[in-house]
């Protein structure tokens, strides 16, 4: 900028000269540049968050239905936006998601507000539309699918989850078996059997109410016959006069309620009654 005072002009510098700045940068030694670059790397590695598209972001581990997904999302995104991203990963609609991070994740707050950290595990609970439709799949279809799946696997009696119960041996108060015969359901509960935790269990068939009661020492579950999708059975190895049996209460194996040491003469009657092939009154 020039100011005129009579015949003299005074030139004032308000900014650093580009030539001077370039010269100053050129004077940096290679050692200084390397040290500066290392410092930037160190600071970057210590950060808990990263920058994605100009926004501070976190890397999350999404866990749903035994599957794990990696997801990077801005910290200032809301719980609702996280649900949309989860939908794109899993196909699970936001309205059917329960997203858990230190409790139920609120949709209207940002991840920063609820203090989500880099590397956090986000648990998701929910069923896809296909899973919901599967619940209403006809029993016959489910039974065929289950049978086909069973044929691919090792015998149930040899699977670890069942061996821990079967290795306890036959219960002392189990009802006697009658090999080579088929009998109708008894008028008294079937008792003395084990469930998957090794606890005693009894079965009571309330035919007038169309219910199956599964009783343990702690409680009694009252199941409508129509809610049981299938009945899985297999003779116990070395004791083919007794069976292990499972009632399928949902679309997956996780819904099986296992019972061990069912007398062979009642197996067919139980299956037919529960699956509605015939009723004994």
Image: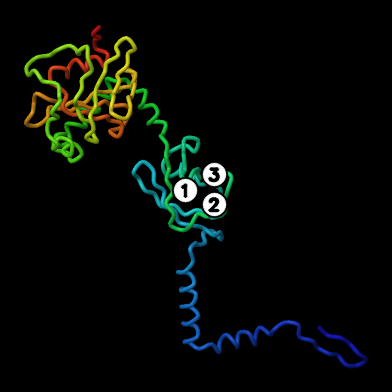
Residue denoted by label 1: 101
Residue 242 is situated, as x and y percent measured from the top left of the image, at 12, 25
Direction from residue 88 to residue 139 in the image, left or right? left
Q: Which residue is mark 2?
A: 114
Q: How many marks?
A: 3
Q: Residue at x 44, y 52 (%)?
A: 71
Labels 3 and 1: the sequence-earlier one:
1
Quarter-of-image position of residue 76: bottom right
Q: Please, what secondary structure does the residue beneath circle 1 have?
A: loop
| Residue at the image point whose x is 25% and y is 9% from the top | 279
Farthest bottom residue? 7
Q: Secondary structure at mark 2?
A: loop
Task: From the viewer's perspective, tell me whether residue 172 is left or right of residue 116.
Answer: left
Q: Residue at x 24, y 10 (%)?
A: 278
Q: Which quadrant would residue 205 be assigned to in this image?
A: top left
Q: CA distance from mark 2 to mark 1?
A: 9 Å
| Residue occupying the point 49% across, 83% down | 33
Mark identifier at residue 88: none
Q: Are marks 3 and 2 in contact (CB under 8 Å)?
A: yes
**Disc 2 and disc 1 in contact, CB within 8 angstroms:** yes
Residue that mark 3 sits on: 106
Q: Nearer the viewer, residue 36 or 218?
A: 218
Horizontal relation, residue 23 to residue 153: left or right? right
Q: Residue furthest right?
A: 6
């Amino acid at each position: 900028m020039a100011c005129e005072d009579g015949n003299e002009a005074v030139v004032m510098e308000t900014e650093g000269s580009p030539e001077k700045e370039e010269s100053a940068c050129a004077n940096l030694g290679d050692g200084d540049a390397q040290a500066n670059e290392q410092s930037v790397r160190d600071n970057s590695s210590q950060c808990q968050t990263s920058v994605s598209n100009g926004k501070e972001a976190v890397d999350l581990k999404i866990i749903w239905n035994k599957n794990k997904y990696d997801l990077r999302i801005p910290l200032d995104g809301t719980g609702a936006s996280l649900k949309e991203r989860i939908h794109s990963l899993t196909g699970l609609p936001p309205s059917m998601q329960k997203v858990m991070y230190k409790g139920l994740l609120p949709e209207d707050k940002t991840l920063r507000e609820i203090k989500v950290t880099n590397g956090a595990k986000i648990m998701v609970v929910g069923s896809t539309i296909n899973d919901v439709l599967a619940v209403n799949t006809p029993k016959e279809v489910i039974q065929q699918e289950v049978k086909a799946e069973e044929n691919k696997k090792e015998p149930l009696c040899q699977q670890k989850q069942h061996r821990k119960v079967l290795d306890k041996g036959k219960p002392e108060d189990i009802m006697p078996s009658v090999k080579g015969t088929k009998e109708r359901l008894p008028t008294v509960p079937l008792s003395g059997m084990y469930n998957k935790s090794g606890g005693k269990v009894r079965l009571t068939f309330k035919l007038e109410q169309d219910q199956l009661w599964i009783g343990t020492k702690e409680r009694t579950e009252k199941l409508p016959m129509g809610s049981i999708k299938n009945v899985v059975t297999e003779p116990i190895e070395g004791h083919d006069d007794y069976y292990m049996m499972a009632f399928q209460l949902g679309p997956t194996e996780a819904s099986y309620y296992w019972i061990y040491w069912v007398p062979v003469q009642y197996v067919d009657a139980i299956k037919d009654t529960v699956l509605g092939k015939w009723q004994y009154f």
